[in-house]
Amino acid sequence: PSNIVTEATSEKFGMLYYIQLGFAALGLVVTLLAKKSPSLPPTAAAFKLDENVTRRSFHHDRLPASTSSHNRHQSPPSQGALSATSSRKSTKSHSSQHQGGTKKYVRRALSVVSATLKTIVTNKNFLLILVVSGLCQGSIWTIGTLMVQVAQPFGVAQTTIGWIGFSGQLVGGFASVLTGGVLGFVKDYKPFLILLISLSALSCMIFPIVAIIIGDSISVAVSNALVALLYVGMCLFGVAQCPILFELGIEVTFPLSEEITSPLVMWTPSFLSLIFVTFQGAILTENPTHEKALIVLFINFGFILLSVLASLLLKPQYNRRVYEQNQLQAANEAKTGINA
């Protein structure tokens, strides 16, 4: 965006919005063309189970039956709802059954969402995950949004800031993929998460410390390098946290629906970054200075430190992993019994 909106005119902003609208439309088309369900089961454990067992046990066990803290599961849809869903080409009576089944499905979905949210409120580990995600990711997104106001007082060109932002997002995307692959070989996600948050905090602090030491004599070349180190480093270690946050959220809330818990992990930093950008933008004002930029960086460093403290309080329980291991063991024992 910094390379497109080189000056504050309606034409430049309009061009940016049209480009973003095009990407959103492309995403919508891809979503509409996507298959309704994946061709393979969601996990290796489920893949090794019998197909019928997978459908009955693994899939619908993830939905809560009530707000109870026990791992009770919701019963499958009624036979009337199933028959109504599959009879669109039948008579009027079947059509009315379909409508009734749809209403039951909607009510059931709403009850699942309501029960999940009520259960999440009592889950301390998941609430801590939301705090970690909100403070750390929210701070990174805030710095990315305010990067122009933060870096320009140090002589960094707007186009350079744009390329730094692009590079940071690119590096962060690759880092998140690598993190997802590494998680398969890690038994405890917590130390890995703490390490990445700590490195994000370190990336946030190098720029202001060096800027304070050098003072007003800091050169443009050094400023460019420091801004690149600041944002690329925060994206590298910050975006890489996302797979860990998602997986931890799913593990500590299992068997609750991950279609509800995972969006909450991303909604929290989105909401907090809106607040952060509002009051930190008021600090920078339309005429940012060295001092104002450093204050903003120190504020976000403080938020990231708080997320480190919150991550230290985590006591994750890997409920889904235990469930899958038990299912796999049961399947292997069943096969052994059949072979015997």
Image: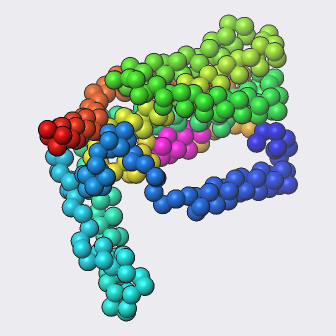
> Looking at the rendering, which quadrant does residue 88 occupy?
bottom left
Q: Quadrant of the N terminus?
A: top right
The image position of residue 10, as x and y in percent, is 83, 55
Residue at coordinates 71% horizontally, 29% vertically from top-left? Answer: 167
Q: Is residue 269 magenta?
A: yes
Helix, strand or loop for the magenta stretch, by majority:
helix
User: Relative to 61, is 136 on the left or the right?
Assistant: right
The image position of residue 240, as x and y in percent, is 53, 29
The total number of labels drawn is 0
**Is residue 320 positioned above or below 228 on the image?**
below
User: Relative to 280, is 252 on the left or the right?
Assistant: left
Q: Which residues are magenta?
A: 266-277
Q: Is residue 84 magenta?
A: no
User: Relative to 92, is 317 on the left or the right?
Assistant: left
Q: Is residue 215 visible?
A: yes
Residue at coordinates 84% horizontally, 50% vertically from top-left? Answer: 12
> Looking at the rendering, which quadrant does residue 91 occupy?
bottom left
The image position of residue 320, as x and y in percent, is 29, 39
The image position of residue 217, as x and y in percent, is 80, 10
- Spot the residue most to the front: 340
